[in-house]
Image: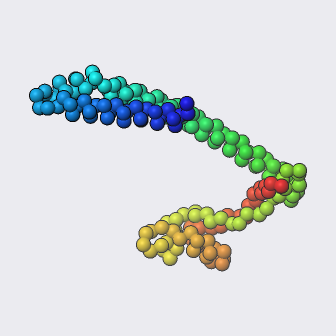
Amino acid sequence: MTKKAYKENKVNSLKNELTVWEKIKEEIDDGSYDQQTILDTLEGETDLFGLVGNLIDEIDEQLIMVDGLKARIQEMSGRKGRLEKTVDSIRTVILAVMDKAEIPKIVTDTATISVKQTPQKLLINNEAEIESKFFTKSDPVLNKKMIMSALKDEEDVIGASLTPKGITLQVRKS
């Protein structure tokens, strides 16, 4: 039986038991019995409480699975981070070797590896020294695009400068 069929079977059993519950309640609820007596009778005559109990057990099992998956995801997330660091380290070593050996491009069976220039990045040295015209007026937040443009136009911006051009590794899969 598939999981879907299993769940549908449980839901159908519960619906059927509820129908039986309602029929019996209609037959015995004539006003001569108190509510507790009616509930006790219905509990004894149907399996509604048992089915609900089974569904609660199912919820508990699902929550145990959720907790296990959370722990596994956390564990795998740590592993993912370590693998990403390894990839970054390998790329850094390849970049350093290619840069030192002055090799601009390597073609392999699976990839073309090239050293390329990166654009300058904005470096805020001291935000407090930057002129107010570089802040957006609604909120006192720096307009970094404006600062970048001014610096590229060789305008002096006290408190900001451009980093030197860098290099990065580009890998294109064949």
Q: Residue furthest left?
A: 32
Rendered residue at 17%/31% (across/down)? 29
The quarter holding residue 39 reads: top left
Q: Which quadrant of the rendered structure holds the N terminus?
A: top right
Give coordinates of residue 157: x percent, y percent.
58, 73
Rendered residue at 31%/25% (across/down)? 46
Q: How is the image coloured?
A: rainbow
148 lies left or right of 171: left
Give coordinates of residue 174: x percent, y percent.
83, 55
Rendered residue at 86%/59% (across/down)? 104
How many numbered circles are shown?
0
Give coordinates of residue 60: x percent, y percent.
43, 29
91 lies left or right of 42: right
Rendered residue at 68%/44% (across/down)? 84
9 lies left or right of 34: right
Check the image and report above or below for 116 versus 54: below
Q: Is residue 170 visible?
A: yes
Q: Is residue 70 visible?
A: no
Q: Nearer the viewer, residue 130 or 108?
A: 108
Give coordinates of residue 159: x percent, y percent.
56, 67
Check the image and report above or below for 55 versus 86: above
Check the image and report above or below for 60 versus 81: above
Q: Nearer the viewer, residue 30 or 106?
A: 30
